[in-house]
Image (tube, rainbow, N blue to C red):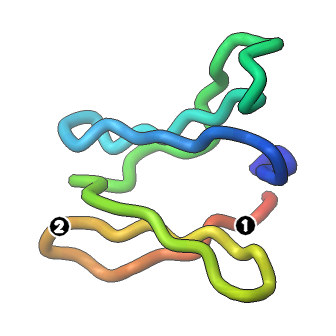
Protein backbone atom coordinates (compact mmCIF):
# COMPACT_ATOMS: atom_id res chain seq x y z
CA UNK A 1 0.00 0.00 0.00
CA UNK A 2 1.16 3.60 -0.32
CA UNK A 3 3.04 5.00 2.66
CA UNK A 4 0.42 5.20 5.44
CA UNK A 5 2.43 7.55 7.67
CA UNK A 6 0.33 10.65 8.23
CA UNK A 7 -2.62 9.22 6.30
CA UNK A 8 -6.17 8.70 7.47
CA UNK A 9 -7.05 5.06 6.68
CA UNK A 10 -10.68 3.99 6.58
CA UNK A 11 -12.69 1.04 5.33
CA UNK A 12 -16.13 -0.12 4.31
CA UNK A 13 -17.69 -3.06 6.14
CA UNK A 14 -19.85 -4.16 3.20
CA UNK A 15 -17.46 -3.79 0.25
CA UNK A 16 -14.27 -4.79 2.07
CA UNK A 17 -12.38 -1.87 0.53
CA UNK A 18 -9.83 0.30 2.34
CA UNK A 19 -8.96 3.88 1.45
CA UNK A 20 -6.22 6.25 2.53
CA UNK A 21 -5.91 10.00 2.25
CA UNK A 22 -3.54 12.57 3.71
CA UNK A 23 -4.75 13.58 7.18
CA UNK A 24 -4.71 17.23 6.10
CA UNK A 25 -7.15 16.49 3.24
CA UNK A 26 -4.71 17.70 0.58
CA UNK A 27 -5.56 14.84 -1.78
CA UNK A 28 -8.56 12.68 -2.62
CA UNK A 29 -8.86 9.25 -1.00
CA UNK A 30 -7.40 6.31 -2.93
CA UNK A 31 -8.28 2.63 -2.64
CA UNK A 32 -5.34 0.82 -1.02
CA UNK A 33 -6.89 -2.65 -0.61
CA UNK A 34 -10.01 -4.52 -1.62
CA UNK A 35 -11.65 -7.89 -1.13
CA UNK A 36 -10.93 -7.95 2.60
CA UNK A 37 -14.43 -8.88 3.71
CA UNK A 38 -16.20 -7.22 6.62
CA UNK A 39 -13.69 -4.67 7.94
CA UNK A 40 -14.59 -3.87 11.54
CA UNK A 41 -11.52 -2.22 13.09
CA UNK A 42 -7.87 -1.23 12.70
CA UNK A 43 -4.79 -1.39 14.87
CA UNK A 44 -1.22 -0.11 14.75
CA UNK A 45 1.72 -1.81 16.48
CA UNK A 46 4.83 -0.20 18.01
CA UNK A 47 6.63 -0.41 14.64
CA UNK A 48 3.82 1.49 12.90
CA UNK A 49 2.45 -1.54 11.03
CA UNK A 50 -1.27 -1.30 10.26
CA UNK A 51 -3.55 -4.28 10.98
CA UNK A 52 -7.11 -4.79 9.78
CA UNK A 53 -9.67 -6.64 11.90
CA UNK A 54 -12.31 -8.43 9.83
CA UNK A 55 -15.55 -9.78 11.27
CA UNK A 56 -15.49 -13.58 11.27
CA UNK A 57 -12.08 -13.75 9.57
CA UNK A 58 -8.41 -13.49 10.45
CA UNK A 59 -6.57 -10.25 11.21
CA UNK A 60 -4.37 -9.08 8.34
CA UNK A 61 -1.35 -6.74 8.17
CA UNK A 62 -1.23 -4.19 5.37
CA UNK A 63 1.92 -4.51 3.27
CA UNK A 64 3.23 -2.89 0.10
CA UNK A 65 2.92 -5.07 -3.02
Q: Residue at x 19, y 37 (%)?
A: 14
Secondary structure under the numbered disc 1 in the rendered image: loop
Q: Does 45 appear above or below 35?
A: below
In the displayed image of the protein, which residue is found farthest to the front? 24
Q: Are marks 1 and 2 in contact (CB under 8 Å)?
A: no
Dividing the picture into quarters, in which one does residue 47 lie?
Answer: bottom right
Q: Nearer the viewer, residue 26 or 3?
A: 26
Assess disc 2: are there few (<14), some (14-19) or many (≥20) residues with their C-alpha within 10 Å of its C-alpha. Answer: some
Residue 62 in the image, given as x and y percentages of width and height: 63, 65
Q: Quadrant of the C terminus?
A: bottom right
In the displayed image of the protein, which residue is found farthest to the bottom? 46
Dividing the picture into quarters, in which one does residue 50 lie?
Answer: bottom right
Assess disc 1: are there few (<14), some (14-19) or many (≥20) residues with their C-alpha within 10 Å of its C-alpha. Answer: few
Q: Does 40 appear above or below 29?
A: below
Q: Does 59 appear above or below 34?
A: below
Dividing the picture into quarters, in which one does residue 52 lie?
Answer: bottom left
Q: Is residue 8 left or right of residue 14?
A: right
Q: Nearer the viewer, residue 39 or 34?
A: 39
Dot label at residue 55: 2
Where is mark 1, residue-wise?
63
Q: Is residue 13 left or right of residue 11?
A: left
Q: Residue at x 86, y 50 (%)?
A: 3
Dot label at residue 4: none
Q: Residue at x 83, y 53 (%)?
A: 5
Q: Residue at x 76, y 75 (%)?
A: 48
* Total numbered labels placed on residues in the image: 2
Q: Earlier in the sequence, mark 1 or mark 2?
A: 2
Q: CA distance from mark 1 to mark 2?
A: 20 Å
Secondary structure under the numbered disc 2 in the rendered image: loop
Residue 34 in the image, given as x and y percentages of width and height: 47, 43
Amino acid sequence: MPEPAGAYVFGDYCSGELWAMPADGSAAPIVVASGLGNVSSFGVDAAGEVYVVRFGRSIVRLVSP
